[in-house]
Image (cartoon, rainbow, N blue to C red):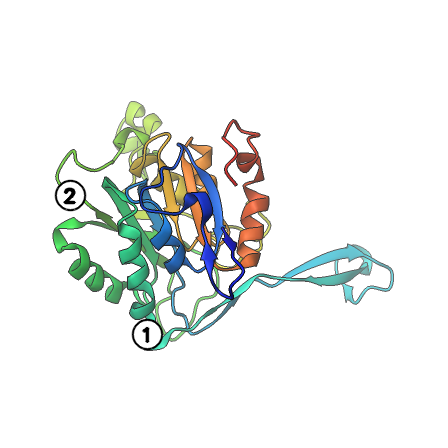
Amino acid sequence: MKRDGSKGALSVGPLGGAEAALPAPTRRIIEGENLQVVAALPAAFARLIYIDPPFNTGHEQQRKRIRVKHAADGERRHGFHGRRYSVTRLASPSYQDRFGDSYLDVLMPRLEAGLRCLTPDGSLMVHLDANEVHYVKVALDELLGRDRFMNEIIWAYDYGARPRTRWPAKHDTILWYALDPRKGRYVFNYDEIDRIPYMAPRLVGADKAERGKTPTDVWWNTIVPTNSREKTGYPTQKPLSILERIVRVHSNPRDTVLDFFAGSGTTGEAAARHDRGFVLVDSSAEACAIMRSRLAAWLNGAHGAPRDA
């Protein structure tokens, strides 16, 4: 995506226009205001939409990063024998997560614009937390109809501080809607569900214990560890394993996945790893730079993907 000569005007180029066709699998990152970008995308090109919008936490989201190096005159003294280290504070991506009572006024027009991009058998997955999920659920029921609501998936994790004044908030919610909820009319690849260990394997027999079981709608999965190779430095980055499960089950190979709150690009990596295309949209230049770096191997064809950057 690029800007034309007039201030604020957006040009989507060959991707734009409702009649435009996207090659499969398209792999593209678009920097721009998502409401305008999504409105210019083709109709019915994506089998799956997954979004992880801001949660309306009321504060700035930022992941502070530092680089530590051994130095005799360093500012920190840690490690064996009192060794000193110099600390360099790195530039860190951030975004404002303050919408107040206008949250639905911001989110719902974008969701409504995105729905036209779904194929008739497509699915919408909206990732939120307790701040707004209840309000968004009611709004989506009104927009789509309650019969299209399929699951409330809970991603539970056990990491971070534990307040003493309330139960620790250690889960997110993913709302799943199918455009056509009739059996066989939406994509749900049961055989692609990864299996997890039984909690009491001796009670189910050796064969079942070895095969494992399919997860329920409560998914226990750690956050992205701070020292993980998966970590990009982008705040609120979601685990690749969560997105891989969603992509495998709710889309087919060569399908395209759309994410218009793309952030660090986890949706794109999950899609590319499983032979899907992706269209990732974000208004942040920092986020798009992280995505281009993270997904370069797929954007430039190193993994056999067509170049479509």
Residue contact between numbered discs 2 and 1, judged by CB atoms under 8 Å: no
Does residue 197 lie above or below 99 as drawn?
above
The disc placed on residue 181 is: 2
Is residue 153 shown to the viewer in this render?
no
Residue 222 placed where, x, y %? 45, 49
Q: Which x, y percent locates residue 59?
A: 47, 73
Q: Which mark is residue 117?
A: none
**In this view, 143 is above or below 303:** below
Q: Residue at x 44, y 67 (%)?
A: 162
Amino acid type at circle 2 is Pro
Residue, x 52% and y 59% (percent of image)?
Answer: 284
Q: Quadrant of residue 19?
A: top left
Residue at 37% across / 30% down in the picture?
Answer: 254
Q: Residues within 10 Å of mark 1 (few under 14, many from 20)?
A: few
Q: Position of residue 87 (x, y in %)?
A: 74, 62
Q: Residue at x 31, y 52 (%)?
A: 114
Q: In which quarter of the image is residue 234?
A: bottom right
Q: Which residue is at the front of the view, 217 or 141?
A: 141
Q: What element carries label 1?
A: helix
Task: Name the outermost residue toward the right.
Answer: 72
Indicate the quadrant where residue 233 lies.
bottom right
Q: Kindly state the secondary structure of the residue where label 2 is placed.
A: loop
Question: Would residue 297 appear left or right of 246 to someone viewing this image?
Answer: right
Give the residue type at disc 1: Ser
* Residue located beneath label 1 in the image: 102
What is the residue that sits farthest to the top in this orientation? Answer: 207
